[in-house]
C-alpha cells in the first residue's frame, strides 16, 4: 500500500509537470537572438510584436510592412501585391520576379529575370498534391538546353523528408542528380516562431529572410522557394553519384520545447568532418 501511494504521488507530479509545460503559450514568447559559430543575429520587434529586422555587427536587414500588415520589404528585397492581396512581384537590385496563381490561389508559375553579365529569363512551375502541398518545382532558363526538377515528399507533420533533384537533358526524360533524406525531432522550430511574428504561417515562403538556416529550392539562386519545417532537423543524408554526405544535429531545449543550443556535424564523402555550434535566446513580452 505504501509503494502504491508513492507511485501515485510520483504520477501526479509528472502529470502536473507535463500539464504546466503544455499550457505554456507561445503567444508571449519570441526569438531574440540567433548565433551560429562566431556570428550573432539579433531580431528586433515593434510595439505590436511584429518582426522589424534582423541584424549583425556588419549588416542590418529591415522588415517593413504596409497598412494591411503585409511585408513590403526584407533587406534589399521589395514585395508587391495584386488586388487579391497575393504576393505578385519581388524585386532586388535590378532583378525581378512575377508570381502567377492558379484558380485555387496557389502559386503556379514564377517568371523571373536576373542580371549576371547579361540578362537571363527563367520560368519556374509549381505542382501540388490533392491536399495542396507543394510536391514539384520545374525550372528552365530561356537559353538553357536542359531543365531541372525538384520532387518533395512530406511526413505526417508536414516536414519534408525527401528531396530529389533531377535534370532533363532532352527536356523530356529526367534523371536523378541527388537524393536528400531528412529526419526531425518532435520539438518546435524557432524560425517558425520568427515567421509568425512577420505574419507568415505557411512553411513554404518566397520572402527572403537572411540568414536563417533553412531549406531552399531552385537551380538558379535568385528568388528561390524557402521552406521552414515544423520541427528541427536531426539528420540529413545526401546521396549522389560520387558518394554520400551526412549531417547530424543535437540540441538542448527549454521548457517550451524550443532549442537553446545545438551542434551540427557534417561529414562529406571523403570522411572529412566539420562541426558548427548554434545558440538561440528568447524573450517574453
Image: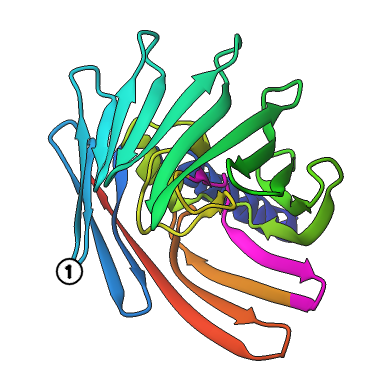
Q: Residue at x 52, y 84 (%)?
A: 275
Q: Position of residue 253 (x, y in %)?
A: 48, 62
Q: Nearer the viewer, residue 149 or 47?
A: 149
Is residue 137 visible in the rendered image? The answer is yes
Q: Is residue 285 visible?
A: no
Instruction: Determine whether, in the image, residue 244 is placed left or right of residue 277.
Output: right
Vertical position of residue 208 compared to residue 124: above or below:
below
Q: Secondary structure at mark 1?
A: loop
Residue that carries the numbered disc 1 in the rendered image: 58
**Magenta portion: prevailing SS class:** strand
Judge whether residue 265 is colored magenta: no
In this picture, which residue range is highlighted in magenta?
A: 224-244
Is residue 247 positioned above or below 174 on the image? below
Q: State the quadrant of the N terminus.
A: bottom right
Q: Position of residue 28 (x, y in %)?
A: 29, 39
The residue lying at 37 percent from left, 28 percent from top is 89
Q: Residue 56, located in which quarter of the rendered image?
A: bottom left
| Residue 241 horizontal side relative to residue 191, left or right | right
Report the quarter where the C terminus lies: top left
Identified at 43% across, 40% down, the residue is 113
Q: What colour scheme was applied to this rendering of the protein?
A: rainbow
Q: Residue at x 54, y 40 (%)?
A: 122
Q: Is residue 240 left or right of residue 67?
A: right
> In front here: 253 or 71?
71
- Tell me if mark 1 has few (under 14), some (14-19) or many (20+) residues whose alpha carbon lies within 10 angstroms of its own: few
Q: Position of residue 187 (x, y in %)?
A: 56, 52
Picture quadrant where residue 139 is located = top right
User: Does the magenta portion include 232?
Assistant: yes
**Figure quadrant of residue 271:** bottom right
Position above or below: 269 against 149:
below
Amino acid at each position: 500500500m505504501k509503494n502504491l501511494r508513492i507511485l501515485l504521488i510520483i504520477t501526479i507530479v509528472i502529470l502536473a509537470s507535463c500539464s504546466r509545460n503544455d499550457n505554456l503559450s507561445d503567444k508571449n514568447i519570441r526569438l531574440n537572438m540567433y548565433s551560429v559559430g562566431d556570428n550573432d543575429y539579433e531580431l528586433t520587434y515593434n510595439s505590436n510584436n511584429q518582426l522589424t529586422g534582423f541584424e549583425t555587427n556588419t549588416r542590418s536587414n529591415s522588415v517593413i510592412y504596409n497598412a494591411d500588415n503585409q511585408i513590403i520589404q526584407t533587406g534589399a528585397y521589395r514585395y508587391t501585391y495584386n488586388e487579391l492581396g497575393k504576393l505578385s512581384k519581388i524585386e532586388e537590385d535590378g532583378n525581378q520576379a512575377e508570381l502567377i496563381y492558379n484558380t485555387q490561389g496557389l502559386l503556379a508559375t514564377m517568371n523571373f529575370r536576373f542580371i549576371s553579365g547579361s540578362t537571363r529569363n527563367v520560368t519556374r512551375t509549381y505542382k501540388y498534391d490533392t491536399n495542396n502541398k507543394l510536391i514539384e518545382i520545374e525550372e528552365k532558363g530561356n537559353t538553357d538546353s536542359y531543365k531541372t526538377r525538384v520532387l518533395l515528399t512530406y511526413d505526417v507533420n508536414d516536414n519534408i523528408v525527401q528531396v530529389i533533384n533531377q535534370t532533363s537533358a532532352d527536356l523530356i526524360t529526367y534523371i536523378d542528380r541527388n537524393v536528400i533524406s531528412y529526419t526531425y525531432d518532435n520539438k518546435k522550430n524557432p524560425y517558425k516562431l520568427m515567421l509568425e511574428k512577420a505574419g507568415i504561417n505557411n512553411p513554404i515562403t518566397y520572402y527572403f529572410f537572411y540568414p536563417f538556416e533553412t531549406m531552399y529550392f531552385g537551380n538558379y539562386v535568385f528568388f528561390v522557394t524557402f521552406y521552414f519545417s515544423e520541427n528541427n532537423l536531426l539528420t540529413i543524408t545526401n546521396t549522389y553519384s560520387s558518394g554520400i554526405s551526412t549531417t547530424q544535429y543535437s540540441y538542448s531545449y527549454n521548457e517550451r520545447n524550443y532549442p537553446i543550443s545545438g551542434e551540427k556535424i557534417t561529414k562529406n564523402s571523403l570522411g572529412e568532418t566539420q562541426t558548427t555550434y548554434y545558440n538561440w535566446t528568447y524573450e517574453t513580452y
